[in-house]
Image: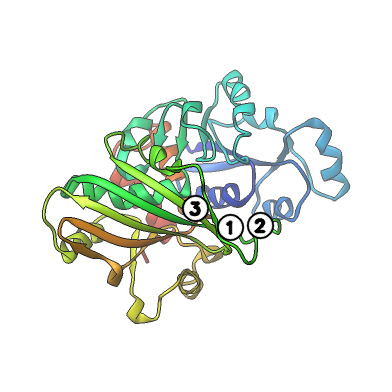
């Protein structure tokens, strides 16, 4: 019997997770929620996802636009085993009580504090920590990126200290209220929250981060310096990443020198929505000097957490005890790594 999944918040992340669930053979979408009858609500109908509203008062607005409504969030909670909360950051805490009352498991996103769930999740690093849990938080896009490359390095070489500068996209592509067109905005609260967030997965990691918001919508860029405990050559590092899931190499000498060209590659590869769910590392931008490793990686903020949500469902619902098998199943279904 398939696990019954609901999506609360059919936006940038929610719609991608819904489509990813649809591609699995051990789970199914029971319904999704929206607060207003936008084009995304119409697209949900085209995907065959029943639509639910956040409140009963919102139903009339949807019906006026010809969008069939199956009920409210409370009705949806009565039909699902687990809910993926993809509401805007800071909103999920308002729904946690509803989930508890309905006896439904819930996955929160990285815009929420770690304390809301008590467990933060990355499939490769701590899959088993979510096993059978009531509430789990999938960490943010940037933290997912940091953990995916740092965790395997720490396992093989050990990490003494990590310093990362995060060049953040100013807004998502669909956000018309996004960042300034001609400005760089440094985060003045230092170090930034990204280091402590990585420590919710790797509490032993000595990491500090800085961040700058840039006038781009495509991807985040990480500039990382990591002090290794064991000696390593450039190729040793590349070999580690080559043998872990959800890390993809590109090369500047192949003409991929920017985040724009990475996103073009996603479209050329016929990726759904042009998404890049892997963390993209420039192979010819990896260099070990002494014991310090320097590298760049690009993060597609709209999609890298999507497969993590799928694996989190499997762990929480006790569908697959082996994390690597879940990762492989998810990646195959979503054409990750191709």
Apparent side of residue 82 relative to residue 321 in the rendered image (left or right): right
Tag 3: Cα neighbours inside 10 Å, few (<14), some, or many (≥20)?
A: some
Characterize the local packing of mark 1: few (<14), some (14-19) or many (20 or more) Cα atoms within 10 angstroms. many
Q: Which badge, 3 or 1, comes first in the chain's sequence?
A: 3
Q: Is residue 61 in sight in this rendering?
A: yes
Query: Which residue has dot 3 on it?
Result: 23
Residue 210, percent from left and from top: 43, 49
Secondary structure type for disc 2: loop
Residue 318 marker: none
Q: CA distance from mark 3 to mark 1?
A: 31 Å
Q: The C terminus is located in which quarter?
A: bottom left
Closer to us: 311 or 287 = 287
Residue at image point 29% right, 69% down: 283
The correct choice, above or below, for 298 with respect to 158 in the image is below
Q: Are marks 1 and 2 in contact (CB under 8 Å)?
A: yes
Marks 2/3 in contact by CB < 8 Å: the verdict is no
Disc 2 crowd, CA 10 A, few/some/many (<14, 14-19, 20+):
some
Residue at the disc numbered 2: 178
Front residue of 198/195: it is 195
Q: Nearer the viewer, mark 3 or mark 1?
A: 1
Tag 1, which secondary structure?
A: loop
- Of 172 and 32, the residue lying toward us: 172
> Could you tell whether 158 is left or right of 16 in the image?
left
Q: Residue at x 70, y 53 (%)?
A: 40
Mark 1 sits on what residue?
A: 170
């Amino acid at each position: 019997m398939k696990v019954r999944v609901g999506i609360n918040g059919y936006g940038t992340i929610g719609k991608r997770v819904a489509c990813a669930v649809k591609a699995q053979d051990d789970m199914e979408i029971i319904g999704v929620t929206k607060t207003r009858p936008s084009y995304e609500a119409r697209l949900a109908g085209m995907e065959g996802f029943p639509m639910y509203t956040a409140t009963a008062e919102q139903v009339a607005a949807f019906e006026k636009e010809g969008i069939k409504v199956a009920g409210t969030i409370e009705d949806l909670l009565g039909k699902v085993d687990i809910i993926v909360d993809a509401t805007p950051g800071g909103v999920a805490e308002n729904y946690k009580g509803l989930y508890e009352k309905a006896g439904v498991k819930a996955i929160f996103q990285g815009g929420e504090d770690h304390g809301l769930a008590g467990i933060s999740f990355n499939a490769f690093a701590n899959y088993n920590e979510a096993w059978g849990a009531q509430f789990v938080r999938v960490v943010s896009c940037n933290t997912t990126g940091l953990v995916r490359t740092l965790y395997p390095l720490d396992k093989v070489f050990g990490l003494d200290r990590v310093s990362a500068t995060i060049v953040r996209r100013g807004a998502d592509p669909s956000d018309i209220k996004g960042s300034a067109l001609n400005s760089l905005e440094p985060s003045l609260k230092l170090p930034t929250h990204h280091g402590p967030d990585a420590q919710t997965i790797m509490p032993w990691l000595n990491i500090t981060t800085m961040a700058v918001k840039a006038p781009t919508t495509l991807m985040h860029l990480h500039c990382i310096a990591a002090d290794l405990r064991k000696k390593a050559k450039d190729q040793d590092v590349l070999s580690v990443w080559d043998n872990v899931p959800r890390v993809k190499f590109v090369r500047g000498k192949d003409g991929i020198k920017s985040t724009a060209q990475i996103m073009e590659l996603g479209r050329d590869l016929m990726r759904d929505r042009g998404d890049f769910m892997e963390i993209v590392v420039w192979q010819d931008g990896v260099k070990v000097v002494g014991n310090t490793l320097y590298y760049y990686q690009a993060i597609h903020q709209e999609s890298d957490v999507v497969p993590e949500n799928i694996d989190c469902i499997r762990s929480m619902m006790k569908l697959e005890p082996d994390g690597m098998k879940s990762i492989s199943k998810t990646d195959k279904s979503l054409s990750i790594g191709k």
